[in-house]
Image: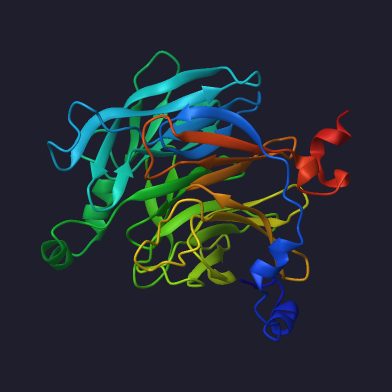
């Protein structure tokens, strides 16, 4: 993996660096202690904390055993958002969200969550519910989720008609969402069009940034420099090393931040400003690109070298840092049977020096 530095002068130096052998690095790294924070989930995807430390988790859902295989695609409303409090007590925050199982490409449902101004926002992926699929929803206590913005309608309005006719539809499959630091908007990656969308809380949508050739975009997050970083998963057949991390400034101007990745599915930053990258799979078997146990967590070191922090992860789909610097990773987030998903917790002290753990400064 190549990490491209932020400054122009450092960029030139980085071009002289050779690709680091990740396998060699991993052999001399101690595996951090990993806790099972929550288990028994149905394909957990994006996560977000509220100010009280409650963790919200989007579950894509699960197939109905009574309908399995009888209809294609399989459709139900088993997708939901879970709330896990600081004592690890799990409750349902939002339920009845659309779930779709495609025989060729896996399961789609609620894909991410964000907490903004005391409200919970839910992002839903491709599906067949006109009011809830491919939308940004707002969920308030004791009320059904309300549509804030239809990403499907936006795609229809902004996709040339001739393309729609040739493709038989519009490219739109929202994957990840993050709230702007100032609370003014939500930013969303599209796994079908290569676009990053900006959605204001009144439902206005515009294209914030776009990569050519419509690559699948996955996780995103704001960096310490104020730029928005997002992952380019890579096109089929997901050749190892073909994934990238891109950064967009406030105007949407793009620059490459990291390359040489394999199926990067999320990107985040700890309290020291270090970049962490989650890889869905190594992609070492072209005939079976999504083999289980091949996910990895990487950290970009100050000199640009990548370190494998954790490997042998089963279908990791998202990660989030808590206010105290602990890292939470959703695993079993795709291609798994009901109840096989989980949330892993890596304590901050296992990731960085104690000075980099915010919780220690509060004690």
Task: State the residue at coordinates (47%, 27%).
Answer: 40
* Residue 266 screen position, x and y as percent: 53, 53
Quarter of the figure with residue 309: bottom right
Q: Is residue 316 above or below residue 194?
A: above
Question: In the rendering, at what x and y percent does residue 102 appear?
Answer: 23, 46
**Quarter assignment of residue 183:** top right
Residue drawn where x is 24% and y is 33% of the image: 131
- In the image, is 312 to the left or to the right of 205? right
Q: Where is residue 52 in the image (x, y as percent from the top left)?
A: 66, 23
Left or right side of 12 for 61: left
Residue toward you, 49 or 352: 352
Residue projecting furthest to the bottom: 16
Q: Which residue is drawn at 14% across and 63% down?
A: 161
Q: Is residue 69 left or right of residue 6?
A: left
* Location of the C terminus (image quadrant): top right
Query: Residue 207's x, y, as percent?
Result: 39, 58
**295 or 126: nearer the viewer:** 295
Residue 226 in sight: no
Is residue 102 visible in the rendered structure shown here?
A: yes
Quadrant location, the N terminus: bottom right
Give the camera-side residue of 27 and 300: 27
| Residue lying furthest top | 142
Colouring mode (rainbow / by chain / secondary structure / one colour)? rainbow
* Residue drawn at 53 percent across, 63 percent down: 251
Q: How many marks?
A: 0
Q: Is residue 27 left or right of residue 278?
A: right
The answer to which quarter of the image holds residue 274 is: bottom right
């Amino acid at each position: 993996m190549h990490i491209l530095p932020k400054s122009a002068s450092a960029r030139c130096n980085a071009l002289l660096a050779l690709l680091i052998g990740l396998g060699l690095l991993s052999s001399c790294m101690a595996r951090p202690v990993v806790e099972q924070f929550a288990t028994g989930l149905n394909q957990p995807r994006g996560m977000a904390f509220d100010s009280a430390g409650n963790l919200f988790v989007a579950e894509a859902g699960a197939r109905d055993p009574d309908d399995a295989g009888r209809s294609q695609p399989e459709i139900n409303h088993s997708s939901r958002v879970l709330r896990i409090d600081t004592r690890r007590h799990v409750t349902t925050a939002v339920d009845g969200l659309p779930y779709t199982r495609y025989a060729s490409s896996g399961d789609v449902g609620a894909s991410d969550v964000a907490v903004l101004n005391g409200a919970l926002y839910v992002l839903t992926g491709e599906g067949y519910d006109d009011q809830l699929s491919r939308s940004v929803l707002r969920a308030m206590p004791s009320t059904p989720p309300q549509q804030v913005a239809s990403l499907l309608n936006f795609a229809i309005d902004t996709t040339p008609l001739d393309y729609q006719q040739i493709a038989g539809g519009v490219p739109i499959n929202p994957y990840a969402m993050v709230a702007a630091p100032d609370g003014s908007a939500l930013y969303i990656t599209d796994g079908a069009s290569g676009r990053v969308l900006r959605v204001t809380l009144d439902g206005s949508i515009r294209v914030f940034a776009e990569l050519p050739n419509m690559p699948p975009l996955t996780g995103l997050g704001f960096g310490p420099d104020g730029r928005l970083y997002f992952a380019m998963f890579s096109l089929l057949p997901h050749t190892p090393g073909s994934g990238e991390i891109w950064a967009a400034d406030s105007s949407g101007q793009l620059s490459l931040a990291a390359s040489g990745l394999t199926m990067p599915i999320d990107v985040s930053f700890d309290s020291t400003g270090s970049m962490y990258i989650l890889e869905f799979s190594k992609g070492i078997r072209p005939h079976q690109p999504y083999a289980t146990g091949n996910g990895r967590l990487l950290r970009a070191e100050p000199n640009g070298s990548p370190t494998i922090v954790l490997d042998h992860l089963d279908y990791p789909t998202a990660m989030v840092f808590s206010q105290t610097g602990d890292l939470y990773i959703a695993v079993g987030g795709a291609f798994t049977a009901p109840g096989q998903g989980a949330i892993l917790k890596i304590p901050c002290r296992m990731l960085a020096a104690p000075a980099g753990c915010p919780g220690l400064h509060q004690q």
